[in-house]
Image (cartoon, helix red, strand yellow):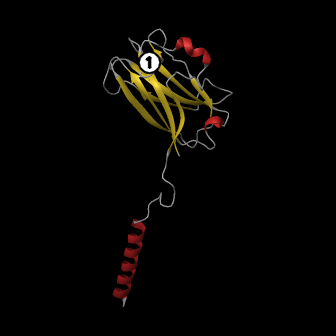
Amino acid sequence: MKICSFLQIGCLAGVVVALLAGCHPRDGRPTPRQRELARTDFEGFRGWAPAMLPQLATDKAHSGKFSLRVDPQHPYSPTFRAELGQLFSHRPRRITLGAWVWVPGFRDDAVLVMAITNPDNPDNPVFRKEVYLNDSSPFGAWKWVSRDLDIPLNTNFSSRSQLVVYLFAKDVTSPVYADDLLLTELW
């Protein structure tokens, strides 16, 4: 009698495991999609300060005639700023930052920076991540770089907080360029 009940329990457990194996955590939910937040080739200036036109490079561009440029004398590019409340109707979880970049060599250390700053303390971001530009070749040519940036749930910000994007030269000897920036959200 005991053997029979152990077999029945074993069979029942096997059936339950087989049924659960076919379940997936995303079953019943829509497939995540990319939603474009911002795209620029610097020919238009939505989100970028209009006064930045003189700071844009015209000597090298992936498309159009303008790009961002950093060099030893100018380590910071112009900055994109937008209130989170204008970009999102909900709390963002993952943002992808991508751009076409031109890096002369692997020793030219520059990054694309994305940060979230609170309006009362813009100099101390509550979230900051970098896209490294010299991690892969080709050098001396345009290449696409991107990074998924997961925003931790404990990050303290409001709808008035700002999403900030800029190019920063950590240690460069020659100019580094970025063009055709794209910000998307996985939702």
Left or right position of 167 against 48: left
Task: Give the residue displayed 49% in from the left and 49% down from the top.
Answer: 32
Q: Is residue 60 above or below residue 131?
A: above
Q: Position of residue 46 (x, y in %)?
A: 59, 26
Q: Is residue 78 above or below residue 126?
A: above
Task: Give the residue displayed 54% in from the left and 43% down from the top.
Answer: 93
Q: Is residue 29 above or below residue 61?
A: below
Task: Give the residue displayed 57% in from the left and 15% down from the top.
Answer: 52
Task: Give the residue displayed 36% in from the left and 91% down from the top.
Answer: 1
Type of amino acid under label 1: Lys
Left or right position of 67 against 37: left
Mark 1 neighbour density, 10 Å: few (under 14) some (14–19) many (20 or more): some
Provide the residue designation for mark 1.
170
Q: Position of residue 126 (x, y in %)?
A: 58, 32
Q: Is residue 22 above or below residue 126?
A: below
Q: Position of residue 165 (x, y in %)?
A: 53, 26
